[in-house]
């Protein structure tokens, strides 16, 4: 039998009972569209979170006070914690491979400019922030590299805060009042957007020591190390850890590399995407059961036809393939409909809710289609074998 | 061309053995026109199914064109059926979703014949059986006589040497019935061996040979004309 005749004949059988074929294929279509839609959401989320992290560059290491331990932190250990200091940050910047060492504290305060006032995030940072966090200065300069304890009272504005306080007016050189102290605006940043909930635009950047005294803090919240691409995160981690242990006498800090964060995050998100895909996969299995049922019924209904095919000289193998072809045609039609439905829903959702991160991964789509065909194949095997093993005489007698 | 020797067919119904065919032996020469007659349950259909290679005897030898077909495997049997044997059934066995044209075309399609040749052959066959203007009709839109003519066109489209017909007029009124018999006789005149099961004595009498069966045995085998 010719291949196109084969497809035509299986297609005619599927078309003969449009409603029944439609309902059967619908099961697969729902499964496929669920897989496509859910993995699109999962993959979109995945990419969204990863890009949030990597917008600060990937060769960054964060050091936080306190030892994270799987055994938990006892009170005795906490009392032993020595705070991270600006001196620690300075010392770390001397390590080979470390380009910049960035002390960070963060808090909230009201910022007044003339009559306008706004509560905003205050970042106490060093002069290298633009390089370490990959921010750009839109106007003026970033904070100068003053000696920490004698820093001049300068402030740099995030783009959102600048708009709120100064609209379109000139702002360089203007005075701000923050926490009872007066600062002079020397620069404004380009918009950077949010990073995991922190709005880097609705923020003011102050010299680290000024911010520490404003918030009454003795210690840093974090030290960020920007390191040379030629060095591995691991070697920097080991060197930094060694130095801090020497300075503090014990390991009372936690070092997190960007790679580690990305890795754990990536694997969590992958599991999420796969889990969500598997959920859709379950509906595919249900669709497969539908095909199995319908094909079993079809083989029973068409016993006379099977007998006739035998009488006309069709081999058992051909009879088997014809019914298998029908099962696969059903699942393939369902798969295509599901693909259109799923991608359509994903696109529609992306249009309706632009904030929702959606990314259709064609790898998952191809996998889903393949699974649909396999489901059809699996569901069709038994009924097709039943058809092929029907004795022709028995089959012809049915009517 | 057909040689049967001591063919036996036994069906097991529960614990009981039903001897559908016992010690059946006879030959059919090329071009013969044979009617098989006998009361209901005498084994006529069982015999025809074995002749058509749709069923296997439990014992005995069946030679078709000097080939021991009782020993062939399924695929070879299918091939012999495809090229040598045409079936006509009491209940037509047309595929309802296919048109008359497509039903007649089906054996050619299954055999992988090229579409252009198929089209020509089927068009000719439909014209020969007076079905030219019914090509696009589905079986449900045809009369019984027309359906059986479509079935005969289908049975002959592969140019078989043998036509096996199990009560081909059993479902037809007498005028369409005699139309069908005329066609079978015409095919026989063209050299095709025709073996037909019938209950109708008038129809049986028109054959050149009548095999009468009773209780799975051949009761009589007579030639006339
Ligand atoms: N598949 C089967 N299983 C069990 N018994 C069968 C089977 N096929 C036929 N028989 C039995 O074999 C015997 C012959 O049946 P067959 O169909 O050949 O009769 P027939 O001569 O064609 O009858 P009819 O004129 O009614 O068509 C009957 O007793 C029937 O019950
Ligand atoms: Mg019978």
Image (cartoon, helix red, strand yellow):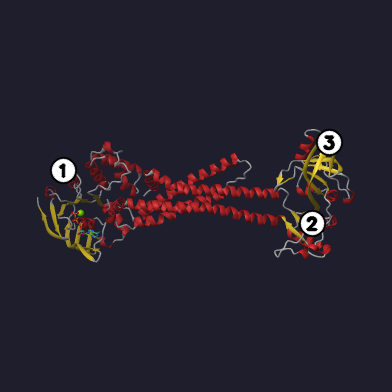
Name, please, the residue furthest toward the top.
A169
Determine which of the numbered discs, if any, sits on residue B174 in the image.
1
Q: Nearer the viewer, mark 1 or mark 3?
A: 3
Residue B46's x, y, as percent?
A: 21, 57
Local crowd at mark 2 within 10 Å, few (<14), some, or many (≥20)?
some
Residue A150's x, y, as percent?
A: 90, 49
Give the labeled residue for mark 2: A97
Q: Quadrant of residue A289?
A: bottom left
Q: Nearer the viewer, residue B59 or A383?
A: A383
Q: Residue at x 80, y 63 (%)?
A: A79
Name, please, the residue furthest toward the bottom.
B15
Give the labeled residue for mark 3: A114
Q: Identify the chain of the residue marked 2, using the numbered disc in the image.
A: A
Name, please, the residue furthest toward the right.
A150
Q: Residue at x 21, y 42 (%)?
A: B145
Residue B57's x, y, as percent?
A: 24, 62
Circles 3 and 2 in contact, beta carbons < 8 Å: no
Q: Identify the chain of the residue marked 1, using the numbered disc in the image.
A: B
- Discs 3 and 2 lie in a common subunit: yes
In the image, is A1 to the left or to the right of A99?
left
Element type at marker 2?
loop
Q: Nearer the viewer, residue A3 or A28?
A: A28
Circles 1 and 3 in contact, beta carbons < 8 Å: no
The answer for how far apart the CA atoms under marks 3 and 2 are is: 45 Å
Q: Identify the chain of the residue marked 3, using the numbered disc in the image.
A: A
Q: Residue at x 20, y 49 (%)?
A: B192
């Amino acid at each position: 039998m010719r291949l196109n005749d084969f497809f035509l004949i299986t297609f005619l059988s599927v078309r003969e009972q449009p409603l029944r074929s439609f309902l059967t294929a619908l099961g697969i279509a729902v499964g496929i569209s669920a897989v496509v839609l859910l993995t699109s959401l999962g993959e979109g989320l995945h990419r969204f979170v990863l890009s949030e992290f990597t917008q600060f560059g990937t060769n960054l290491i964060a050091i936080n006070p306190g030892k994270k331990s799987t055994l938990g932190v006892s009170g005795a250990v906490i009392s032993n914690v020595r705070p991270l200091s600006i001196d620690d940050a300075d010392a770390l910047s001397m390590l080979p491979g470390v380009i910049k060492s960035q002390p960070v504290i963060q808090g909230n305060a009201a910022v007044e400019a003339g009559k306008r006032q706004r509560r905003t995030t205050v970042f106490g940072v060093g002069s290298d922030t633009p390089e370490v966090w990959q921010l750009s200065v839109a106007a003026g300069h970033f904070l100068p590299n003053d000696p920490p304890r004698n820093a001049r009272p300068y402030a740099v504005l995030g783009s959102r805060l600048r708009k709120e306080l100064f609209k379109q007016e000139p702002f360089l050189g203007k005075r701000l009042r923050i926490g009872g102290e007066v600062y002079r605006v020397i620069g404004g940043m380009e918009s950077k957007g949010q990073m995991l909930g922190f709005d880097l635009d609705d923020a003011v950047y102050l010299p680290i020591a000024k911010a520490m005294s404003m918030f009454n803090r003795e210690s840093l919240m974090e030290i960020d190390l920007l390191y040379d691409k030629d060095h591995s995160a691991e070697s920097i981690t080991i060197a930094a850890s060694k130095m801090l242990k020497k300075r503090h006498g014990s390991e009372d800090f936690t070092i997190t590399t960007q790679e580690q964060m990305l890795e754990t995050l990536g694997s969590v998100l992958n599991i999420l995407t796969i889990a969500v895909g598997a959920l859709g996969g379950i509906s595919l299995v249900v669709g497969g059961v539908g095909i199995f049922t319908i094909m079993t019924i079809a083989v029973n209904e068409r016993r006379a036809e099977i007998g006739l095919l035998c009488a006309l000289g069709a081999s058992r193998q051909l009879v088997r393939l014809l019914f298998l072809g029908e099962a696969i045609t059903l699942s393939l039609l369902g798969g295509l409909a599901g693909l259109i439905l799923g991608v359509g829903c994903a696109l529609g959702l992306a249009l309706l809710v632009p904030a929702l991160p959606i990314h259709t991964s064609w790898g998952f789509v191809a996998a889903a289609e393949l699974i649909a065909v396999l489901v059809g194949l699996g569901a069709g095997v038994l009924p097709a074998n039943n058809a092929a093993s029907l004795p022709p005489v028995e089959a012809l007698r049915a009517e | 061309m057909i040689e049967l020797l001591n063919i036996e067919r036994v069906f097991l119904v529960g614990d009981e053995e039903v001897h559908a065919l016992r010690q059946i032996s006879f030959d059919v020469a090329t071009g013969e026109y044979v009617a098989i007659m006998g009361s209901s349950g005498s084994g006529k259909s069982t015999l025809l199914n074995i002749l058509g290679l749709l069923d296997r005897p439990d014992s005995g030898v069946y030679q078709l064109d000097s080939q021991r077909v009782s020993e062939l495997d399924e695929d070879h049997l299918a091939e012999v059926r495809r090229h040598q044997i045409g079936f006509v059934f009491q209940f037509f066995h047309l595929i309802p979703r296919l048109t008359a044209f497509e039903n007649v075309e089906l054996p050619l399609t299954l055999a992988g014949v090229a579409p252009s040749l198929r089209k020509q052959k089927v068009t000719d066959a439909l014209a020969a059986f007076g079905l030219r203007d019914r090509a696009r009709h589905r079986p449900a839109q045809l009369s019984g006589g027309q359906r059986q003519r479509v079935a005969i066109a289908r049975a002959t489209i592969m140019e078989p040497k043998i036509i096996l017909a199990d009560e081909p007029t059993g479902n037809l009124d007498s005028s369409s019935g005699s139309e069908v018999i005329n066609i079978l006789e015409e095919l026989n005149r063209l050299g095709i061996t025709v073996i037909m099961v019938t209950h109708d004595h008038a129809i049986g009498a028109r054959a050149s040979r009548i095999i009468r069966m009773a209780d799975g045995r051949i009761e009589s085998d007579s030639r006339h004309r």
